Image (cartoon, grey):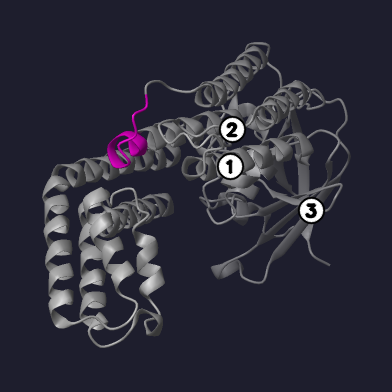
Amino acid sequence: MKKVPAGTWIVMLLSVLFLGGMIIYWYNYNAKATIADLQKDMKTLVDTSVILPKAKVSNAVRIEQKLTNKDVTAPLNLACSDFFKAWNNKLTKAQADTFRTRIDTQAGILKFAYAARSGNQLLAVLLISVIVITFFCLAFFTNLLRDPQGSTSNTTQLQIEKAFWESMDNDPEKASPPFSLSRTQLAVWITIISSVYLYAILWDKRNIGEINNTALLLMGISAGTFAVGAIMDTTEIEQGVVRHQEAQPSINFFRDLLTDNNGISVHRFQNVVWTIVSIMVYFYRYSNPPDHNFNNLPTLDTTLLALTGISNATYLTLKTRENVSLKKPVTLNIKLLLDDSVAEKAAILATAEGLNKAVINIITSIGEEIHAMPNPADAKDTFIAKVEPDKFQKIEATWQGKDAMAGIKLNGSFAAIIKDTPEEQTIEITLKKQQ
């Protein structure tokens, strides 16, 4: 049975959780359900009013607060308010019956009137779910949010192994490109603004005449950042620049957004932080508009919008210097030889596999290890790896015999530092018996 990729399970889980959460939200908080919930609570209070005075009932105030809901229109609000005014001491059964009938009548009228609106709210929930789930799918299964790629020959063996440490697949052609900060920012704002717009129109029934300046500026800033960043990427690819986007395959989402050729960078970090701040304030302002105008999309103050623009401009300015110091990786063709002192030399070379089961460790100047892979063109005794110039320090090769040759162990090494070498270099390592 074919193994389902982890990304597929993640997308399925996120999609089910989001859709399920949205359906539960609609079921409990749509306009019709809001009135039904209030009617149920009021019926309990009216029955209680025959037994206890208002001061003795702890949830009376909480239910009074529900009357501020915009879905509770004047006739029902007035009926409930009149009941609370009359209910200081105990009410007679006749008084309670009068209030109950009046409240039930007005609630029934509203529930009938809100049947179509609840349908619109369900439509809002479904459309927003489609947008968000589509975003999840495109993010995981396409390159929508990933950096454009030039030549994968710039991907070093060390970076591939870091990205695929759980896998035996070290093919740079299959390495996923890292996630792009500018592409992610644009896609996130598109998803948020479109979802909020649908929610305002279909759920809250806001009379929004046009998209406001905040939405236009946020979309303009993120779209402009993406456009300038895309031009930079295309120019570097056309000029053959060694880019960290190819040298470093994707490790994980947040590391990709925050990392350049020197690791996690402050100009990317500040951009991510200010984007998150803007998103949180945007959601907050939906329910708490500064001008108390609820017939509009959220409005951010000019200072925050200016900071967002400055943050993106800072990111773009320093992005131009991200790939300046990178050098093309060196391809090492490592050929293994057997020393004449090895008595089993002829027998080892006569086998079908030869020396291709040898373990080749390339040790860098900072102690990291790269594992060379058998060369498909000559897999019997030749290995291949890509390393960064100035970082390669030593190669250690080990071969361990099996079956009839069990107990035979051969070692060899090559010590040198690559500096200003051609893009491809052949190295020969002679294996000898371990002393």
Q: Secondary structure under badge 1?
A: helix
Above or below for 113 versus 239: below
Identify the residue under disc 1: 281
SS at mark 2? loop
Q: Is residue 33 left or right of residue 377?
A: left
- In terms of secondary structure, where does tag 3 sit? strand
Callout 3 crowding tier (Cα within 10 Å): few <14, some 14–19, many ≥20: many
Q: In which quarter of the image is residue 321?
A: top right
> Which numbered disc flags the more N-terminal residue, 1 or 2?
1
Residue 121, x across and y down, in percent: 25, 44
Which stretch is magenta? 198-208
Q: Distance between the residues labelled 1 and 3?
A: 62 Å
Q: Does the magenta stretch include residue 203?
A: yes
Precedes in sequence: disc 2 or disc 3: 2
Residue at 35% x, 57% y is: 17
Q: Tell me whether circle 2 and circle 3 mark residues in contact (CB < 8 Å).
A: no
Labels 1 & 3 near each other (Cβ < 8 A): no
In the image, which disc is placed on residue 300? 2
Residue 20 coordinates in the image, percent (x, y) = 30, 57
Return the x and y of residue 256 as percentages of the image width and height: 63, 41
Q: Which of marks 2 and 3 is in front?
A: 2
Give the x, y percent position of residue 64: 36, 65
- The residue singled out by tag 3 in the image is 412
Q: Earlier in the sequence, mark 1 or mark 3?
A: 1
Amino acid at circle 1: Val
Q: Nearer the viewer, mark 1 or mark 3?
A: 1
Q: Residue 310 carries which label?
A: none
Quarter-of-image position of residue 428: top right
Residues 3 and 383: in front is 3
